[in-house]
Image (cartoon, coloured by chain):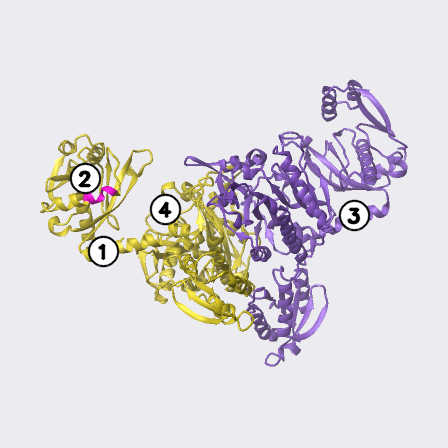
Chain colours: A purple, B yellow
Amino acid sequence: MNTTPTSQNLSHLRHSAAHLLAAAVMELWPDTKRAIGPATDDGFYYDFEFTQPKSSDDFEKIEQKMRELVKSWKSFEHLELSSDEAKEKHPGNPYKHELIDEHSEMGNKKVTYYVSGSFGDLCKGGHVEHPDKELKHFKLLSVAGAYWRGDEKNKMLSRIYGTAFFTKEELEQYLNRLEEAKRRDHRKLGKDLDLFTFSDLVGKGLPLFTEKGATIWRELERYVVDEEIRRGYKHVKTPNIAKTDLYKTSGHYPYYKDTMYPPMKVDEDELILRPMTCPHHFALFMSRPRSYKELPIRYAEMANLFRYEKSGELTGLIRVRQFTLADSHNFIRKDQASDEINFVLDLIEDITTALKLTKGTDFTYRLSLGDRNDTKKYYDAPEEWEFAENCLRDVLKKRNAPFYEAPAEAAFYGPKIDVQMKNVLGKEDTAFTVQYDFCLPERFKLTYINEKGEDEQPVVIHRSSVGALERVIGFLIEHYAGSLPVWLSPVQVMIVPIAERHIDYAKKIAETMKSTISVATPTGIRVELDDRNERMQAKIRQATLQKIPFIVIIGDAEAETANADQQVAIRTREGKDLGTMNVQQFIAQLKNDIEKKI
Amino acid sequence: MNTTPTSQNLSHLRHSAAHLLAAAVMELWPDTKRAIGPATDDGFYYDFEFTQPKSSDDFEKIEQKMRELVKSWKSFEHLELSSDEAKEKHPGNPYKHELIDEHSEMGNKKVTYYVSGSFGDLCKGGHVEHPDKELKHFKLLSVAGAYWRGDEKNKMLSRIYGTAFFTKEELEQYLNRLEEAKRRDHRKLGKDLDLFTFSDLVGKGLPLFTEKGATIWRELERYVVDEEIRRGYKHVKTPNIAKTDLYKTSGHYPYYKDTMYPPMKVDEDELILRPMTCPHHFALFMSRPRSYKELPIRYAEMANLFRYEKSGELTGLIRVRQFTLADSHNFIRKDQASDEINFVLDLIEDITTALKLTKGTDFTYRLSLGDRNDTKKYYDAPEEWEFAENCLRDVLKKRNAPFYEAPAEAAFYGPKIDVQMKNVLGKEDTAFTVQYDFCLPERFKLTYINEKGEDEQPVVIHRSSVGALERVIGFLIEHYAGSLPVWLSPVQVMIVPIAERHIDYAKKIAETMKSTISVATPTGIRVELDDRNERMQAKIRQATLQKIPFIVIIGDAEAETANADQQVAIRTREGKDLGTMNVQQFIAQLKNDIEKKI
């Protein structure tokens, strides 16, 4: 929730633009019924019920009308009307009438109404003072269906989106960023680069990763798993289904049941797809007695999780109906909490560094706190909350980590640190979290035997190291605009023989690369050979479009060295000519880049 | 189905033993109601309704009575009785009465009844001629609950299992094998070696792999995946759920719906946990047009699959409710079929060799054929069946592979080669299969563009390379009696410092091993340090019981070399003393063993 004055003004500007949009639409198509039109983080929208469908082809006409009308908008005049008066202003409009009725049912005698030029609208207020002077730099962006009040049972309206800025430069910058985001859209690149696909037969929100997409997945998965194991995490493997009772015991059920799949009745049991891993790891912890000497015990897993998302909310790899979380539950003594949070953040920062994401720029931390007054939403243990929140805050402060606090954003079982990633448009989203939990250990009666031989309750840190693999892959595709670092690239080298007579040597080079087995290349260097009967330039162009990091070109000069010191000519996907070099030297360099994740 | 004369006689002997068991029980506890008592592959059983529960503590008493009674059993006298006469022989016994009624409902006027000594029983026949002379070497083995006629709605009876042989030696051999099987039982070893666990809270048939079990899993998975990729398989990643319609399109639904989980209704769709991967891989194949030049396309996946098994059929890791199949679907031109089957069998035999399983001894092939007359069960395309069956048979013959044929054991969509593994008791089971499919490509209308530019239908080879990971892990634990080869061992080296003053050097050695990163040891050598304040012999014993391949002992002599040439003393889990050697030399040897899978 950003509430600085600048953004407030911007939101006033954009809300004013929404009025202007509605005014233009009503002038052009007077039989339209208008619903609501707020400002958003990125602009504004207005929902309409049109008698004839509208498309982006109509935007120019609407914008022109907006520019024409705004000249006469000297101010927004504030009126207070009775319900009946307000309804008269919107004859035959069920949306406005519904809002007015609700308002009066809540005990309000008057509704507020704003007039600018000859256009009036039911409105809570929040506009610029001089629309004719301030509201100049706006742009309509898209139109999409939206249910009245977001409810699928209601009528589908047409939502027109737009944005507005105070200066031309800001608007242009934003539109450029939008263009850039479109170019980087992982859904488009996923198709162009053949990384994943969707199938109507399989179902919505269920991506199928092709060989290339699965390669990125495998590289990322093994990197994270191996890194975690080296640091002392115990990687385990637990089932994707469990008895519904498990989630009732854990207390997750009431909070998550809306996003859980329906239970499946088999035998005397009711099974359910798991939405999280916690209780499975708790079951492992409880499988035998534990001593304080064993702690911390860190159970990590690449866990398949299943959450039902509404079809309207599904977005490529970012919002899916099955995902794989790099998950872990760290069972600790309470006095180990600070060390453990640091241990977890160290890993997160090492992984983000390896992925070339910059702390403070590409991501930041959010400290999500509980609310001591809301014991319905948050587990009622004020002292534990206090301790845990202070612990997380202190760690972040001592690390000089960039963070801000967010009241009442915690999990029901404790406060958390959210890793907030910024996407190409600068929009911030929670990518994954580090959670301090003193509630589930109590619900499951987890214990370990302490130094005195007594039962004691551990604290659990729930954490991810990189989030859901699907989501991070989608994010990385956009971050790198498809040009993934060489270690993550599905094809690392494309070999381009110029003529047919160069194919033999090209094959030999390909074989040498394929059989380069090392810890960073367990299945060899990923190489393809373009032996089609095409012009060299076309092949290079194709490999460049496919964002293949290195293109090895084999012509007469190189082929002549086949039985000597084996030279190859190298180009990069950025179009840089690296000249010719010995193939073993190139491989050594490549292996080094892959190993070091350069 | 083994029907050699010897085993027939053995089955006669065992069936006779079942009579004898029932006779002894009726003498000892005359108010018992007896049900049925057939011979089985390994022995015999008899089902009883006791008035007082019996346990293995009663076996000696029963066996003694059996030995006593059999002396007077000179033969089995065959009688033919009317239903009423037969019922009189079993007064108040609802089980026998039910069988007699069924027999007469099927139109039979007479039932057969056999008398030996003073004991008679309703029976179809099949006994030894001279029980007093032949029936000497028997043994009762266990007692378990069993529903009358296997139906959960019926009464639970007590089933007493036993076995019998013609010679004392054979019986003893069998009992030794049974003991050995108990010792090797993966469920017991899984617990003793802390490899996996089950949780009532999570649910039946859903194993949770601990760190150690998950390590075996990861090693096996990466080995198979990397081996497949090196050979040209495209590893992909597809979701665990799909629309129920997908399995209706594929035609799997009617055949598999009894073992599929119930569908889950979400939005307008019905989703279901996938019981197999085929249609997902077909969806990938169909995601863009294909050319003959691309074939074979081999989509491989470590696929999570879900089949509902009755709780009575669940067995450790061998029969579970969720499993991970090393699956693949190879899309080929029909003329590539022989080559492809060979390609697939080559991989299977290389993997089994790496796991030290011997062809012909540990596993054999079964060629499972269709039935041209049963067009309800088998897809109706006689010429395709003929071609496919001949193709598989020819390949097996040309390879000189050990195989036998099994009529009417094919999949509904084509014939298959079953990989039949033998367990410790010599019992054969289908571990996984290679299937030739000409039916699903037709159902899904799969096509590729052939040399002439026309649409043509591919053939699909469904195959696994090693079966389900859960099952193969269970099998390997038993095969190796827990002493897994070093590359699969969860802990590869245990370091045992003799006294506290040796711990520093022991830690140094452990660190050196942990940081030995190579393609075969991406997370270092898996080493543990036993720094407990215990006697050396106790620590060695503990490591041996945990089946850790190498035990490194650090005493004064070794610790003295800490800053010199770093010597260590090595023992194996077999108790062999390998003497002292330089630590780098030991690591090099170990790395070699791991890499070569020795």
Q: How many numbered circles are shown?
A: 4
Callout 4: SS = loop
Mark sitting on residue B25: 2
Mark sitting on residue B377: 4
Q: Is residue B527 left or right of residue A417?
A: left
Q: Is residue B275 left or right of residue B175?
A: right
Q: Nearer the viewer, residue A497 or A371?
A: A371
Callout 2: SS = helix
The answer for which chain carries disc 2 is: B
Pointer 3: what residue?
A175
Say if mark 1 contacts mark 4, CB within 8 Å. no
- Residue found at x 28% / y 38%: B149
Q: Of callouts 1 and 4, which one flags the residue occurring earlier in the amino acid sequence?
A: 1
- The three-letter amino acid code for the residue at tag 3 is Leu
Q: Are marks 1 and 3 on the same chain?
A: no
Within-10-Å neighbours for mark 2: few <14, some 14–19, many 20+: many
The answer for which chain carries disc 1 is: B
Q: Nearer the viewer, mark 4 or mark 3?
A: 3
Gap between marks 1 and 4 measured at Cα: 44 Å
Mark sitting on residue B172: 1
